[in-house]
Image (cartoon, rainbow, N blue to C red):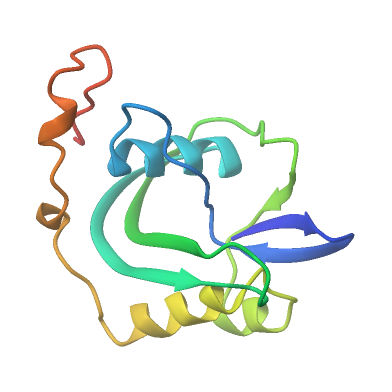
């Protein structure tokens, strides 16, 4: 879990971020987790696809949540907006303010075994970008 600042409050979130131009979802997950936690991971399944609108006038956010296997701790440098990255139990997580309801929803879905294969993702449109293609090992 990452602890990050939101509206002057320290909240918990799963590592998250945006997909960069010409980047696959899997590559984005690997990059974002490394940037926010210092860990190298391997995506192994998709947990779910979620939509969330935090308030009536806000944008709707879409989250693709992945199940990953940790590979190794690569470094301790974290994105500037991340306070810390910690391994936590479910009880510890739920005793902290959460960035959104999606944090607890993803935990519940994981416990229920709601996952699908990475083969659901079609990255064929990225094949034209040889320098950007990334193969998940």
Number of marks present in the image shown: 0
Residues 116 and 96: in front is 116
Is 26 drawn above or below residue 130 in the view shown?
Answer: below
In the rendered view, tell whether residue 3 sits above or below residue 37. below
Quadrant occupied by the C terminus: top left
Residue located at (13% from left, 57% from top)? 120
Q: Horizontal and vertical percent for residue 128?
A: 14, 18
The residue drawn where x is 43% and y is 32% is: 20
Q: Residue at x 35, y 78 (%)?
A: 110
On screen, residue 97 above or below 25: below
Q: Quarter of the image holding residue 113?
A: bottom left
Residue 123 position within the rendered picture, expressed as x and y whole percent measured from the top left = 16, 38
Report x, y in % for residue 127: 12, 24
- Residue at the image position 18 percent from the left and 13 percent from the top: 130
Judge from the rendering whether residue 116 lies leftward or rightward of residue 37; answer left or right. Answer: left
Q: Quadrant of residue 76?
A: top right
């Amino acid at each position: 879990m990452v602890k990050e600042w939101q509206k002057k409050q320290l909240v918990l979130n799963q590592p998250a971020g945006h997909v960069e131009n010409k980047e696959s979802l899997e590559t984005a997950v690997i990059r974002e987790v490394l940037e926010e936690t210092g860990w190298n991971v391997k995506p192994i399944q998709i947990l779910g696809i979620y939509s969330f609108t935090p308030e009536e006038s806000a944008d709707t956010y879409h989250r693709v949540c992945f199940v990953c296997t940790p590979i190794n701790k690569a470094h301790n440098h974290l994105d500037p907006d991340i306070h810390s990255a910690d391994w936590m139990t479910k009880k510890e997580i739920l005793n902290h303010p959460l960035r959104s309801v999606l944090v607890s929803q993803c935990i519940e879905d994981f416990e229920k075994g709601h996952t699908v294969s990475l083969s659901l993702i079609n990255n064929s449109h990225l094949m034209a970008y040889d320098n950007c293609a990334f193969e998940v090992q």
